[in-house]
Image: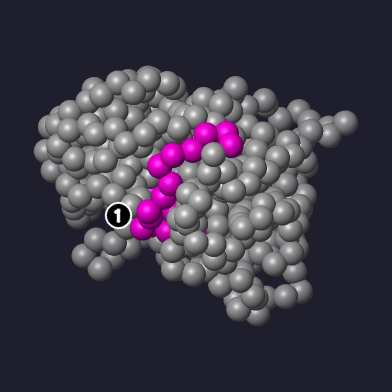
């Protein structure tokens, strides 16, 4: 029997409370799920300059902030005196940083495996829609909260698995489905829940794994010839699934790649994925096939300087990628040919964004490199916060949000108008 806790209020009754506006940064990598924002954003800051506010966040979590209707939502794990950490969701006022509510969602089992040093107990990013905040803690469970006050609408822990290095991949919303990848040591599935109740809608096994089975990627929804596809990458294989039923549309196998983190992107008529450890490879795939298209629909592959953790970024017909060791590469998105590469230094885990005609890259030391995309590397600025950061950016109008190990920053030029 499913362990689902339901509120007496139906989700449909809450839709008018906190609507998601066009342009809200309501999920991992923003409205399109691929890191694009209108901008413009600030280009100069440090620990004090152009910092509107800095808010200390209790506990530790590497989920990226999301923003809807003037509120910021994120998750964290707060240590307890006994037992595992308290897995919590928070809402903050986007203008002031004031904490509006702080809700415990689950308490982690004290015997649960410890996450990797570059992971946390609260790494998946929430997603917000129509007055609801959906939070996901990987093997520890998934919940729907009221955006207004953090009240639980439903919560389920029915889809546990044996984690390796903790949790990671974030959920996405497609129609009436909340969809996430669940790739553990013992089970590997793509799972869809009914977003209004938390009940299982479908579960599709990830078959064809030939190496280590665990991965952490976030799915991407695309539309091909009028049909939506859920693109989910895991160890050894990327699958395209029908959102309503979980039916497999196509698949591409790539051998023994595992611990896949980067989220897929879609541009130039191609799906771009990274294959994870130990030898990361970029695959560009035509998504109009059926069945196993490994031999027929891979347009090109790239093996040089492909990231293990940061997602890719498409701007025009170019693909930008930053390796974990700090090599930035610009590729021709249609052929995979390298246009240029530049060593910018640092260690990278966060995913880049494109806003206001510029690309923003955040390294693990809290340093942001900004450049103008084009036929050559054109540096705009380098800005240091001096705090460890693994989470990805969020954007609200002309304000940039950066989550560090201890705090959340709102960064904006002093001339930016307040909302």
Q: Position of residue 87 (x, y in %)?
A: 73, 43
Q: Is residue 45 magenta?
A: yes
Q: How is the image coloured?
A: one colour
Query: At 34% from the left edge and 23% from the top edge, which residue is drawn?
Result: 344
Where is mark 1, residue-wise?
Answer: 249
- The secondary element bearing badge 1 is classed as strand
Whether residue 167 is visible to the viewer of this picture, yes or no, is no
The residue at 60%/78% (across/down) is 16
> How far across and how far down the image is residue 221, in percent?
37, 56
77 relative to 32 in the view: left or right: right
Displayed quadrant of residue 23: bottom left
Relative to 304, say whether 143 is above or below.
Answer: below
- Extent of the magenta region: 26-48
Q: Residue at x 38, y 55 (%)?
A: 39
- Main SS of the magenta segment? loop
Q: Residues within 10 Å of mark 1 (few under 14, many from 20)?
A: some
Q: Quadrant of the C terminus?
A: bottom right
Classify 126 as above or below 87: below
66 in the magenta segment: no
Identify the residue shown where x is 60% and y is 22%: 117
Residue found at the far right of this picture: 81
């Amino acid at each position: 029997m499913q362990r689902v806790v339901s509120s007496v209020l139906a989700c449909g009754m809450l839709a008018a409370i906190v609507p998601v506006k066009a342009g809200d940064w309501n999920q991992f990598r923003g409205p399109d799920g691929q890191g694009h924002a209108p901008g413009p954003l600030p280009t100069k800051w440090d620990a004090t300059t152009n910092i509107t506010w800095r808010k200390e966040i209790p506990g530790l979590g590497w989920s990226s902030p999301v923003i809807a209707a003037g509120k910021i939502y994120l998750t964290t794990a707060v240590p307890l005196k006994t037992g595992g950490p308290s897995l919590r969701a928070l809402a903050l006022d986007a203008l002031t940083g004031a904490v509006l509510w702080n809700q415990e969602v689950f308490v982690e089992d004290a015997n649960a495996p410890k996450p990797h040093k570059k992971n946390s107990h609260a790494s998946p990013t929430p997603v917000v829609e129509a007055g609801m905040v959906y939070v996901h803690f990987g093997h520890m469970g998934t919940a729907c909260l009221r955006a207004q006050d953090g009240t639980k609408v439903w919560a389920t822990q029915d889809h546990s698995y044996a984690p390796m290095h903790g949790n990671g991949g974030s959920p996405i919303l497609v129609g009436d489905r909340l969809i996430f990848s669940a790739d553990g040591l013992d089970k590997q599935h793509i799972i869809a829940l009914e977003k209004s109740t938390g009940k299982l809608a479908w579960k599709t096994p990830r078959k064809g794994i030939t190496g280590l089975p665990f991965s952490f990627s976030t799915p991407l929804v695309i539309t091909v010839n009028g049909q939506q596809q859920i693109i989910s990458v895991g160890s050894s294989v990327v699958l395209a699934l029908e959102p309503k039923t979980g039916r497999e549309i196509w698949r591409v196998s790539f051998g023994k790649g595992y611990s896949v983190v980067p989220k897929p992107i879609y541009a130039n008529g191609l799906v771009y994925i990274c294959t994870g450890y130990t030898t990361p490879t970029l695959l560009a795939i035509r998504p109009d096939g059926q069945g196993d298209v490994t031999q027929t629909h891979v347009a090109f592959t790239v093996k040089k300087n492909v990231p293990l953790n940061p997602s890719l970024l498409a701007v025009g017909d170019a693909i930008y990628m930053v390796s974990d060791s700090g090599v930035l590469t610009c590729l021709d998105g249609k052929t995979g040919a390298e246009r240029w590469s530049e060593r910018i230094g640092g260690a990278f885990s966060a995913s880049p964004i494109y806003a206001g005609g510029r690309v923003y890259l955040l390294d693990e030391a809290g340093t942001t490199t900004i450049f103008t995309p084009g036929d050559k590397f054109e540096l705009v600025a380098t800005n240091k916060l001096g705090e460890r950061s693994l989470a990805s950016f969020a954007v609200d109008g002309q304000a940039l949000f950066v989550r560090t190990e201890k705090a959340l920053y709102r960064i904006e030029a002093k001339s930016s108008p307040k909302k």
